[in-house]
Image (cartoon, rainbow, N blue to C red):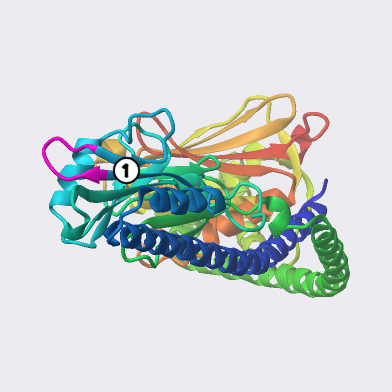
Amino acid sequence: MNSRAAGALGAWLALTIIAAVAVASVNFVRVGDGFEGEARTLHRVVSQRADQHDAHLTSLAAVLASPDRSIMTLGALAEAILRFYPRITAIDVLSVGPAPELVFTTRRGQPGPPGMSEFAATAAKLSAGQAVVMAEPNGVEAYHLVKRLPETTAQAGVLVMTVDARRLMEPEGDLPAGTNLVLRDPSGRYLAQAEEPISSGGLLPNLVFEKTLGSRSQPLLLRVARQPGLGELLPPLAVALVTAITGIGVLLAGFVLRERRSAREARERASFHEHQAKLAHAMRVNTLGEMASGIAHELTQPLTAILSRSQAGLRLARSPSPDWGEIIGVLDANVRLAKRVGDILARLRAYVSNSGPAPEPTSVNRLISNVAELMQGDLERRGIALELGLDPSDPVCVVDRVSVEQVVHNLVRNAADAVEALPQERRTVSVTTTADRDAAAIVVRDLGPGIPAVDLPRLFEPFFTTKPDGMGLGLSLCERIVEGFGGQIMAASAPEGGAVFTIRLPLLGGRWKEAAE
């Protein structure tokens, strides 16, 4: 899969995810609103049921407070309540005191409610007519509504109504599957639960509703919770539509962008090549300006020698008996020196020319020697030694000689800058050439402080520099030139200290020594 196809696929996936999240968010709000309405309806129903308990307690207390206090009437009323309200499982009447007695109960065959002493003790602290909620002491999902009766009821002082907490919070209709209902007493103690509890660490957020019942005597906390299903938030039809729409949108956008990109890339390539050529030429001219004193020294030496030998030859020719052998030797030496001057000037003209690259078979060793001759004067003036280690096999590559000389010159100059301020024994720059089966390598090494590890990944980025007055274009341009000939350039810090730059260039099919001649 190419990069464009991968990009289009990534864009489609990203848009699909964004659209799916938007659909899920809308559906989550819709499901949440529905859940809120269902939970509030259930809370209102449960609160009304709790109010009914108060009404039943009031009716039972009225029978016990009547003059005849008929147990039969009490029993008939209690049986009617149990029959029409199944969530009320028992009604008991107890006396108040340290040893409470069971006055009345609907529990057939049972001695009475568990915890009679606790009920009586709690009721003793209440005022007449006051009721409180007490949890079932044996852990059953039920609670007791304990009410203190007026003193007119003789020995009958406590009215206890037992309520099945699970039935109390049963919805009148069907709630969505997985809805969790929890009922707690005013102290926060658990009374009953419907469905398994919902964990809070799921992928989807939970919907939660909590509110205390509206009953004054039974301020129980009702908690309703549910986790929406993935199918509710992302229905299959909506997912299919989102996938199709985003896919069509990405295809159309990709077609339009591809056409625009093709036209823009064509313009940018032409502009880039033109800019690169101008920048390389400007850097070469600037480099020669920095090397002016060294170049003057290179030209002064042979010219001075030509002048000196010419004067000596003139004296020999004017002597009474001229030695023509010595005169011929002087002329031969002058010819060699003049050719040397011509070679130096030819290299300078090629170096500063603004002609495009002309790849041809080039001796890597001769290329390095040319750079060394150009830089020798400047390096000697700065007190920096240049050591050459050239491969005896003389590797040959098809490159533009001037362009690669510019790259090597840039690396040697950077190495010289790194060691210029160091002690004399470390002011050395070495350039070596080697060759393996496929490529020739040019290695420029110095003994300077090396390259910080944090800078290595960015070293060849345009405009990145560690020099106070640098523009950050030298190494970037070097990389482009080398890659233009199918090679690569790498940088590293040597374990023993210093920086190492390696240029690898593809070899010509065979060794071509004649290129150096």
Whole-percent x, y for residue 299 in the image: 51, 59
* Residue beneath the point at 30% across and 35% down: 137
Whole-percent x, y for residue 449 in the image: 32, 42
Left or right: residue 43 compared with residue 28: left
* Residue beneath the point at 27% across and 61% down: 67
Whole-percent x, y for residue 319 in the image: 50, 51
Left or right: residue 405 compared with residue 239: left
**Residue under label 1:** 135
Say above or below: 443 vs 46. Answer: above
Considering the image in quadrants, where does the N terminus appear?
top right
Nearer-the-camera pick, 134 or 190 = 134
* Residue beneath the point at 33% across and 42% down: 104
- Magenta region's main secondary structure? loop
Total numbered labels: 1
* Residue beneath the point at 29% across and 54% down: 186
- The amino acid on which the numbered mark 1 sits, given as a three-letter code, is Ala
Nearer-the-camera pick, 2 or 350 = 2
Tell me if I can see residue 353 in this picture.
no
Magenta run includes residue 493: no
Disc 1 element: strand
Say above or below: 199 vs 352. Answer: above
Q: Quadrant of residue 195?
A: top right
Whole-percent x, y for residue 294 in the image: 44, 58
| Range shown magenta | 94-101
